[in-house]
Amino acid sequence: MMLSRFLTPLGSAARAQNRRLAFPVVLMLALALGVPAVLPGGAQAQEARRRWEMMAQIRRDKFDYVLPEVMRENGVDMWITVMREGLHDPLYEDLGRGYIGGTAYYIFTDRGEHRIERAALGVDGYFLSENGAYDIVTGQFDLKEFVSERDPGTIAVNMAENIGAADGLSHTSYLNLVETLGEPYASRLVSAEKLISDFRSRRVATEIIAFGETAELSRHIAERALSNEVVTPGVTTLEEVGWWIMEEMRVRGLDTSFDMPSIYITGPEGIEAVTNDRIIQRGDLIMIDWGVGLMNFYNDMKRIAYVLKEGETAAPAGIQHAFDQGMKVRDVIRDNIKVGLTAADTLEVLNTKIEEAGFTMMANFNQTTDDDSTEVIIGCHSVGNTGHGIGPSIAWFNPKRLEFEIRPTNIFSIELFAYTPAPEWGGAKVRIPLEDDAIVTERGIEWLYPVNQRILLIR
């Protein structure tokens, strides 16, 4: 469908005057109508600028509101992130990018005021200098003199035992930093692991808006992928669906959370095939597990589709029942995640509440029993700047982050797996994975976009 049908022609003077106003309308129409966001050169440039301006606003808000809070909670007087040309820290986007020709230092110092001093030493470039987030941007500096003048009692650096995104300091950069600072400052270096986890996982309003845009794009593409727009039963392969999605991301200027999307078929014996040359057939139950990246945000979500057999108008009753059971479990999870508890305590509460609701908690992932119950395991992990985030995580596979307290504005991927016997599968259990992204507020869990409410049907 052509966007021109919805736009009133304008004279040249009006077009010039309203170009920046009209562009967001074009973009929103493109997204709403499923039209790839490929726009004329000027419009493309404006979209690039829109994204950068949003990220710059996020950065300023984070530095103003979140950074003082988390540095003081973690007892950090100075935080130094070191980067080198060709070796960027995982927080490169968070801290404002910039051109690094040698070694750069992004330094944040608590000088006892209402805000944290921000300095970018040895890094420059338009994206950094023009974002308005830094007090000092210079290539002329003496690092030891800079640190000595501020005399911090603790200096956090990006070394982390458990969280990869907080472990960006290379061994060589660490040795150089120790040598350059000398004593007593070399002995004051501490891990920034918890600081970085808190900094990234506590969200300002602009982040929530940007993440919601990211997640909605992911949902929109996934639901188109699992439809007859893309799938022809008996013809289309799983990997062809995957490549259609990859092309959609390329056209829209998106990144991927987990490389090639996981598109898989589940049957009575479990997962039969994943993003390969398996041809999609009638009667197949297909899942997609994936996420997209936009403006330094990456989401994680799933969708489910059933390929109708000839004469069918809905998924078989047993499969629909299994899906409905999963939805009930999700309601229990949504109603019982609250701020103030650790992720570990929350996991214990959820397991208890799920069992009280009549379900059976599984001890190990994908290891079901032969009983007639719906068996459940949950993995509600953090999400945000990566598909698997670095904040508190209500998931067995993130043991360290189970220790972290859930705070307002933490974003979670509400993920569960429910296994329910179905007569159509000879009593074998249908594996239903549900996963959508939500924010935790003082009210509890609030969804960030329309969550999965149905099995998609491919005719």
Image: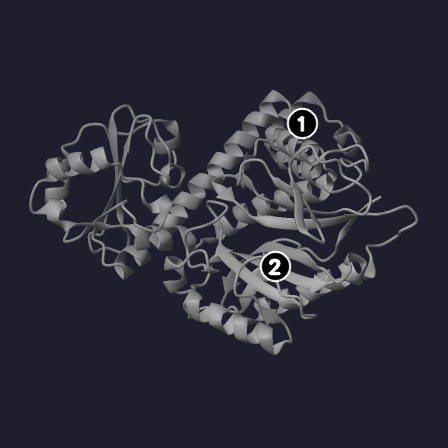
**Which residue: 56% across, 75% down?**
353
Which of 75/187 is in front?
187
Asked whether the viewer can see residue 403, the reply is: yes
- Picture quadrant where residue 290 is located: top right
Coordinates of residue 307 in the picture (x, y in percent): 80, 46
**Which residue: 70% across, 66% down?**
325
Q: Amino acid at mark 2?
A: Phe
Compared across the picture, whether 339 is left or right of 430 comes to left
Q: Looking at the image, is mark 2 or mark 1 earlier in the sequence?
A: 1
Coordinates of residue 216 in the picture (x, y in percent): 63, 46
Q: Which residue is mark 1?
A: 14
- Which of label 2 and label 1 is nearer to you? 2
Q: Give the farthest residue toward the bottom.
A: 356
Q: Give the farthest residue toward the right.
A: 311
**Which residue: 52% across, 65% down?**
363
Mark 1: few/some/many CA within 10 Å (<14, 14-19, 20+): few
**Which residue: 67% across, 70% down?**
371
Secondary structure beneath dot 1 equals helix
Coordinates of residue 224 in the picture (x, y in percent): 73, 41
Q: Which residue is mark 2?
A: 417
Q: Amino acid at mark 1?
A: Ala
Coordinates of residue 430 in the picture (x, y in percent): 70, 58
Q: Is residue 143 above or below residue 406?
A: above
- Picture quadrant where residue 316 is located: bottom right
Which of 129/319 is in front?
319
